[in-house]
Amino acid sequence: MNEHFLQQVQATLLTLANPERANAMRAYMRDQFDYLGVPTPERRSALKPMLQGLKGAGPAQLIALASALWELREREYQYAALDLLNMHSRELNIADIPALLSLVLRKSWWDTVDALATIIGDILKGRHEHMDDAIKHGNFWMRRIALLHQLGWRGNTDSARLYSYCLAQAHEKEFFIQKAIGWALRDYSRHAPDEVRAFTQTNKHILSALSYREANKHL
C-alpha cells in the first residue's frame, strides 16, 4: 500500500507542478528546500480524496506513510504528510508522539515544525507527555514544539508549565525560540490577559525584547 500511495501522491502533484512558482517558493524559504510549485489550496484539493481514503488505516500505517512522504525531495511532500497527519489526528495517540517528534528533527524549518506542534497539541489535549523532555532538548526546534504545544488550549492551558518553559528558554538568542515564547504568551493572553500582563511585567528584565513585544502585542 505504501508504494502505491506514494506513487499516487507523486503523480498527482507532478501534474500541478509549476517551475516558475517553485523558484519563488524556494526563494521565500531561503533556498533551503526544493519545490514543485504547487500552492497549498491546489495541493489539498488534489490530495483530499487520497487522504480521506486512509480513514481507519491505523496509527502505524499513518505514521509510516507520513514518514515515507517526508523522505521525498520536494517540500510539498512534507506538507502532504502534515495534511495526512492533521486529517487523521484523532486516530493517533500519545504513543505516536515520539514518531512525530522524530519528524521535527528532519528537514526542520518553521513551516513543518509549527504544523507538527499543532498536531501534537491536538493529540495531547490537555496532557503534556514528552514535552518536559522536549523543552530540555539540544535541538531548538524540539524546544519550540514544547513552547507551542498548548496553543489554542485557552482554559485548559497549564499556565505554570507555560511560564516555566518560557523562563527556562528566556536566555536563548535563537530567533525562533524568542518568537515562540512571545507567541505562546500572546495566545494565552486571549484567555488570561491580566495574568500574562503581570507575568511579562515581572519578567521584563529576563525576557528578550522580541518575546516581550510579541507577548504584549494585543494587551
Image (tube, rainbow, N blue to C red):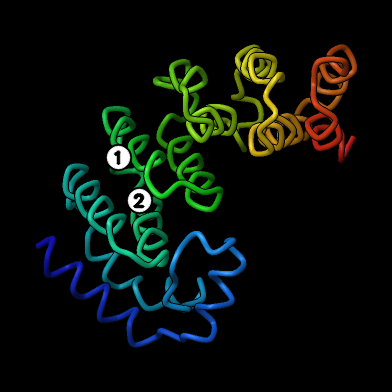
Question: In the displayed structure, would residue 113 be above or below residue 128?
Answer: below
Q: Which of marks 1 and 2 is nearer the N terminus?
A: 2
**Front residue of this view, candidates 16 and 25:** 25
The residue drawn where x is 46% and y is 78% is 38
The percent coordinates of residue 80 (x first, y second) are 37, 63
Q: Assign the N terminus to one quadrant of the image.
A: bottom left
Inspect the image, locate mark 2, and give the three-letter code of the amino acid beneath it: Leu
Question: In the displayed structure, would residue 115 be above or below residue 78?
Answer: above
The residue drawn where x is 65% and y is 20% is 169
The percent coordinates of residue 129 (x first, y second) are 40, 20
**Front residue of this view, candidates 193 and 74:** 74
Left or right of residue 77, residue 208 in this image: right
Left or right of residue 56, residue 36 in this image: right
The percent coordinates of residue 104 (x first, y second) are 41, 40
Label 1: which residue?
92
Left or right of residue 205, residue 51 in this image: left
Q: Residue 85 carries which label?
A: 2
Inspect the image, locate mark 1, and give the three-letter code of the amino acid beneath it: Leu
Question: In the displayed structure, would residue 75 be above or below residue 70?
Answer: below
Which of the 4 quarters of the picture holds residue 201?
Answer: top right
Q: Residues within 10 Å of mark 1 (few under 14, many from 20)?
A: many
Count up the numbered dots. Answer: 2
